[in-house]
Image (cartoon, rainbow, N blue to C red):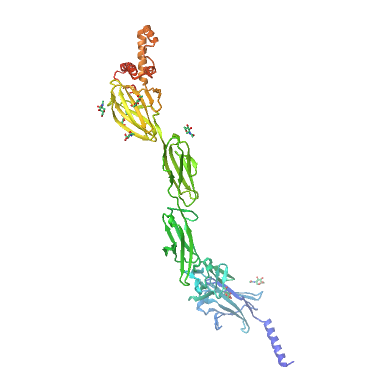
Amino acid sequence: MDPRYVALLVAGLLVLTCKTWALVEVSMEDRVEVFLNKQASIPCVYHMKEKAMIIKWYKKLPGDGSKVLFIIEGELREINDKDYTGRISYTHSYNSSKSQGSIVLTIDKVQLSDEAEIICIVQDNTLKNQDEGHTQLQVFNPPSFPAILGTDRGISVDEELSMVANCKVDNVYPRPNITWYKGTFPLQSSKDVKIIDRVTRNPSGLFTLYSDLHLNVVREDEHAEFYCEVNYFTPGEKRMMESDKINIEVFYPTTEVTMWVNPPKKLLKEGDTMEIGCKGNGNPQPIFTIYNNKNEVSSENELVVFKEVKRSDTGKYMCEILNFDTGTVFEGSIDIMIHYLDEIVVTPEKRVLDQGEDLTLTCNALASLSTHTEWYKDGVHVLEGHVLKSHNASSNTEGTYLCKVTVVSLPELQKQTSLHINVRANPKITEEIVVSPRNKGDHSFNLTCFAQGYPIPNITWQINDLQTGEPLNESSVEYHEKGVGVLSIISVKADSEFTANCTAFNELGITSRSRYVTTFDQGPTTTTATHTKGITVPPKQHQKGGSGVVIAVVIICLLLLAILGSFLYFLYKKGRLPCGRSGKQDFTKENANKDETGMKSGKSEEAVLLQGVNGDKKSPTE
Ligand SMILES: *[C@@H]1O[C@H](CO)[C@@H](O)[C@H](O)[C@H]1NC(C)=O
Ligand SMILES: *[C@@H]1O[C@H](CO)[C@@H](O)[C@H](O)[C@H]1NC(C)=O
Ligand SMILES: *[C@@H]1O[C@H](CO)[C@@H](O)[C@H](O)[C@H]1NC(C)=O
Ligand SMILES: *[C@@H]1O[C@H](CO)[C@@H](O)[C@H](O)[C@H]1NC(C)=O
Ligand SMILES: *[C@@H]1O[C@H](CO)[C@@H](O)[C@H](O)[C@H]1NC(C)=O
Ligand SMILES: *[C@@H]1O[C@H](CO)[C@@H](O)[C@H](O)[C@H]1NC(C)=O
Ligand SMILES: *[C@@H]1O[C@H](CO)[C@@H](O)[C@H](O)[C@H]1NC(C)=O
């Protein structure tokens, strides 16, 4: 063996032995991590036979690696570095049973400038032996919440790598990383993605990080959510924060045009308001030109309103756009149908029928869709279908007919028309002549006669004064047509009883009805003669006598009975006295079918008696 090697080996062994038996041994933690402005405690532990007299603290500057002595513990402890003034405290203890010394250096309000490799050097009291320990002091400051800002303009899919969003975090140490996400996927720089980060440091040494995201935008990006995530270190762990999520507006060209109509899915009819418009599948919507049967109805407008549409608005509507870049024309179209229902026409025009005639009415209305027709007679539904047939016309056939036409699939489209059918008929007077109470002022009576028939009959009156035998003139005449009849009202001045004869006639015949009227009572004495048929209807009886008069007559009768005794009783039994409910009744029974003279005489008898009761000739109802 080469003596040189032996010497080296011996020397090495010696060094090893010296180290193992070293008189001073120092140990420190590798790292001490602390938040900015908090307190850092840096322990330095040594093994030595006695308490160390001299301890030196160095800090190793980043960069050239030069060491700066900042604390010496000797006979007196001194702090060299002004930066630490007032911020450093220091404990030193020694356990002789363990031969172990323990020093803790505490730095308050840790600054970024405090971040360094700290070296603790312990010397034995002979100053011949020493050992040193190293600790990396690491300072942290968490970032502000990451602020994201999307571009406020729409980005075209044609643009290359345009900036989509920007993300910023403030006041962070050490430098963090920013990661971009689209949906759940992290984005990495590639052909279609470019991420540009910028960092600035403020005077205190904290970082501000900016990250710009540039993309080749595609159509699908209009629904994508973008956000940024910041990853940063804190004492003992790595953390992350996510920014808000943003959307971007993507511009892409229209390649397909569709048209819509409002109201949708509904049949349109004349008079409706219709809106039609266009929609492209691009963003933003392009400028459309709208045509109707090749006539331009609107340009630079995606919506056209048609008020009160007509059937002539039916047709094909088209929408056109021109892509200026490619010169391509895209178009869409829609077929519009405006439905209608024309006025109803009823045939034949003839509205007057003869008795026994057949009637066929046809109701038609032109419509763009199938219709449903109904007939009503005097408000009652009689038929579904457009032809109404009726045989053997009679008075029952007369009435107001209504034809209603409805478009089946569009019930709002409905029209109706009504017409009146008359059937020729002889005049008829079915009711008594009505006599009003006598007018107090001029002693006149109003007489009313109602006659039916078609054509509407005319009415004439004939009034005969029964005392003088002279005809009386009516002072006023009124006519009121009512349906298929006519009402005639006349006013007659009379001082004694009279007969009123109402005659109704039309081209088919004549009929009359008469009534006897006293000046005291409008009691019912009438005679009807229907000349066309030659039948005389017996007059009906009307009981209109006042009960007051009846009671008075009864009282008088009772008085007479009481005074005159049995003689009068005998007379009464024979029925000679007009005592009872109404003398008039007896009279009418006796004279119902007698001639006018008979009536006259019977009447005067009654009139005298009633006059005696009432004195002042008042009518019984008054
Ligand atoms: C010194 O260390 C021993 C053994 O660990 C322990 O029992 C003793 O309490 C310590 N003395 C002091 C003053 O800390
Ligand atoms: C940032 O990214 C670098 C490189 O990927 C990595 O080494 C570092 O640990 C990251 N920092 C954080 C705070 O995540
Ligand atoms: C027509 O009606 C009249 C009166 O109702 C009736 O007498 C006659 O028999 C009817 N004629 C026919 C053909 O039905
Ligand atoms: C009679 O008819 C006239 C005119 O219609 C009317 O003014 C008057 O009140 C009527 N008299 C009676 C008593 O009804
Ligand atoms: C019916 O009466 C009206 C009104 O008074 C009259 O104009 C008409 O000529 C009369 N008709 C006949 C047929 O007398
Ligand atoms: C009735 O009228 C006719 C014609 O207007 C007239 O000549 C006659 O004098 C009148 N009679 C009475 C009683 O007023
Ligand atoms: C009523 O007058 C008409 C025409 O003047 C006549 O023919 C008829 O007999 C009269 N009727 C009565 C009941 O007096």
Q: Is residue 620 visible?
A: yes
x, y percent for residue 496: 29, 21
* Residue 268 x/y as whole percent: 46, 54
Taking the image as drawn, is residue 209 in sight? no
Q: Which residue is farthest right?
A: 1
Compare residues 393 and 177 and report the one nearer the observer: 393
Quarter occupied by the N terminus: bottom right
User: In which image quadrant can residue 473 be found?
Assistant: top left
Q: Is residue 24 left or right of residue 478?
A: right
Res 187 → quadrant: bottom right
| Rendered-image quadrant of the C terminus | top left
Along the line of sight, which residue is nearer the eye, 582 or 62? 582
Q: How many marks?
A: 0
Residue 578 place in picture, x, y as percent: 36, 14
Residue 577 placed where, x, y %? 36, 12
**Which residue is at a point 67% across and 83% down the rendered structure image?**
19
Query: Could you say which is closer to the camera, residue 583 or residue 604?
Result: 604
In the picture shown, does residue 379 fall above or below 580?
below
Image quadrant where residue 532 sits: top left
**Where ligand 7 lies, by quadrant?**
top left
Vertical position of residue 297 compared to residue 506: above or below: below
Q: Residue furthest bottom?
A: 3
User: In this picture, is 20 found above or below 356?
Assistant: below
Between residues 188 and 540, which one lies in front from this camera angle? 540
